[in-house]
Structures are given as structure tokens and as C-alpha cells.
Amino acid sequence: MSEASSSNITEFSVSELAGELKRTIETSFDHVRVRGELGRVTIARSGHMYADIKDDKAVLNTVMWKGSVQRLPFKPEEGLEVVAEGRLSIYQGRSNYQLIADFMRPAGAGALMALLEERKKKLSAEGLFDEHHKKRLPYLPRTVGVVTSPTGAVIRDILHRIRERFPVRVILWPALVQGDLAATQIEAGIRGFNAMTGEDRPDVLIVGRGGGSIEDLWPFNEENVVRAAFESDIPIISAVGHETDTTLIDFVSDARAPTPTGAAEIAVPVRSELLVAIEDRAQSMTRALTRVIRHDKERLRASRLPRLETLIAQKRQSLDYLDAGLRGGLSSAIKSKHIHLARSGSRLRPDPLNKDAREARRRLIDTTKRARPALQRLIDTQRQQLTAQGNLLRTLSYQATLERGFAVVRDDKGKVLRSAAAASPGDKLQIMLGDGEIGADVAGKSATAQPVKPTPAKPQRAANSEKKDEPPQGDLF
């Protein structure tokens, strides 16, 4: 019985059962709307979003493909309560059911306001809203940059208001102001204007759009837009929504306008008012200058300065006094020089000079008389010394020795022979005597002749000891 009943049950494989479940769920829940809190939000590199939608009792895995993610009007964040629409499906690989979301929005304004307040606290703690970061707006900009939609009424209102007040150059950076791509384009507009150089670079920026719900204005609350406005070197005027609308870019901008038209009024002054103010100041300066001139005239008149002729007459009188004094002083100086010259001329007469010359000649004669005997004695003394030196020279000269009978023998080369051993038979010799020279030939040597040893250059004591062994030699002197 049990086996027969069990045989009627259809047998499925795991894949077949998973497929049947998937078809059943996708057919029964092909369009559902779920409300819950986002958790574990992940944006993959492919652009798909994977998240959990949960409440206090259950968790629903949620997938949103790239195309749907790009159309989101806000940035999904963990903890945000949302309402998602889509279809249920099963991921067969893990047998998990999940929601394939096609659309997602915050669950009412309360959720967005809570997220806005949390983000505001975070950015404020970083100092992005501090007043000392605010830049001063230029009084009369030459170029105004506008970041907004090119087709909305905002740009038309701004252009019209600027044209009425003070026509200046306006450059538009077109950007979406609503939707998921709006924040990226607004940030690109702010950074793009700051990257400009030269005359195209704006002096002030207006970032704005018209009014709308909090979801419509949400791109101006995104963190990347707020940080781009904070890092801008160009002053920014925020003009988002109406006067009652508040976004985070309002806190970081250098000025906030209640409307885009109000932003144009803040950006440029009124030309007609400037002309009136300039005219008023010109008139004020003219009146002030007139008062100064009038006051100076009155003061000059009250000073009662003397007439020009009187001043010249006084100076002419002083000149006459100086001329008279100069003439008298010059005459006195000339007389003084005449007297000095006369005194000097008396000392330059010939008689004193002749007397001085005779006295000098007498002293010269006396000196000559005394110098002649002294000079003669000096000459005699020098002559005696010279004679004595001559006698000594003759005494020490070898010529005197030759005259006493000695001779100097040289070989044919003119070298003096000091020993008989230096001569050989047949050598030609020159013999110098006291009265001349004679030639001779060496015929032979005597057997008894003893060679004379040359005297070495030794100390005197050693030389004397060697001479004792030599034969006696006569003194040349």
C-alpha cells in the first residue's frame, strides 16, 4: 500500500525542483512593492547594486541592475528606509529567493530628512560650513558662470535679471538638476569653471535650480557636490529652490540667494544706481574742492603779503651794501699786499747777496788750504803701502825664484813636470829660466834619480811627518 502510493509522486531532480519553484514564484510575484530599511549596500564594479531590505523580523536579498541604478533619484545608503518595486525570483545556485528591483525611492520625506541631518552633522564636524572659509564676492564681476539646466526657467530668469541690472558676460555650464546623474554633472560644472584660465574664467558662480520636493532637490545635498563647492576658488552663490528650501550646498556656498533671480541681483549691482552714485560723488567732490579753493583765497588775502616792488627794493638795498663793502675790502687787501711786497723787495737788494757770496768764497778758500796738506799726506801713505805690496809681490813671484837660478820644465803640451818619472827618453821639453826659455830633448834617465812623490792634501801635521822621510829640499825664497 505504501509503495503503491509513493509510486504516484513525481520525482524531480534538484535543478528541476529549483526551476519549478522559480517559475512559480516569478509567476505569482511578478510585481511587488516592499518597504523596509536598506542594509549591506554594495555597488559592484559592473554597476549593479546588491543590498538587503529588512525589518525587525526578516531580510530580503535585493538586486538592482546597472540601468535601474543610474535612474535612481538618490544615492542608496545603509540605514535608509526605502520603498522598492520589482519582481521576486530565485537564484538557483543557492536556492535563495531575492527581489529584482526596478525602482526604489526613499520611504517618505522623513527618511531623507534623517539622512540629510546626519550628513549635515558629518560635514559640519569637518569644518566645511565654517564662516572663515567664506570668500568675498566681487563687487563688479566681468564674467558670471552659471551651473544649471539649459532648458529651464532658471537660466532665463538669471540672464534677464543681469541684463536689466548690469550687462556682463554670462557663461552657462549645462547640467542636469534632477535625477541620479545630476550630482555628478553639477560637480563637473563647478570643477570645470575652476579649471578655466584667462578671460574665460568667471569671477563668480551661480549654482541653482527651481523649486521642488526634497527628492527633486536631493542632488544638491550629495557629498561630492558639497565638497566641490567647498574646494572652489571662485566664490559661489547658491540658488536652489525657493526661500523655504534648504540644501547642504547653501551652507558651504559663499552666499545664498532665496531664488535664482535673487542670485543674479547679488552677483551684479544696478548700473543706473552706480551712475547716480558716481554723479553724486562727483558733485560732492566738486563742492568740496570749491570750498577748499575759496578758503585758500581768503587765507591768502588775509595774510597781507608785501608788494613785489617792496621786496625787490629791500633786496636791492642789501646788494648795494654788499657792493660797497666788497669794494672797500678789495682796496684794503691790495694795499696790504703792496706793503708786504715792498718789505720783501728790500730784502732782495744786490748788496746783501754780494756779501753772502764773498763770505762763502772766503770759507771755500780756507777749506781748500786746510785740505791740500791732508790730501798730500793721504796720497803719500797710499803710495808707501802700494810700494810695499809691490815688493812683497815680487818676492813671492816665481819669476824672482827663476832669477836665483831655478827653472820650470814643461812637456810639449805645456804641462809642468814635477818628477823625472814623468819624462821619457825622446820627449821634447821646454825649460824656462830667469831670462828666457830653451828647448831640450830627453836623452835618458839617471839611475840614481829618486822620484819625487806628490804631496797629498792632508792636514799640516800629517804632511810634516811625511816630509821627514823625504830628501831635504832648498827653500825657493
Image: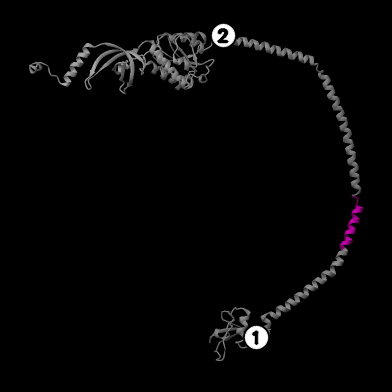
Q: Is residue 377 left or right of residue 128?
A: right
Q: Which is more toward the observer, 165 or 118?
A: 118
Q: Which residue is mark 1?
A: 406
Quadrant where the image shows the N terminus: top left
What label does residue 273 carry, if any?
Answer: 2
Asked whether 12 or 73 is in front, the reply is 12
Residue 437 lies, with reference to residue 32, above or below; the image says below
Q: Residue at x 19, y 19 (%)?
A: 18
- 397 relative position to 363: left or right: left
Label 1: how many residues lie within 10 Å, few (<14), some (14-19) or many (20+)? some
Q: Determine crowd level at label 2: few under 14, some 14-19, many 20+ residues with C-alpha closer than 10 A.
A: few
Q: Residue at x 75, y 74 (%)?
A: 386
Give the magenta range.
348-364
Residue 16 appearing in the image: yes
In the image, taking residue 46 as reference, residue 381 lies left or right, namely: right
> What amino acid is labelled 2 in the image?
Glu
Asked if residue 368 lies left or right of residue 472, the reply is right
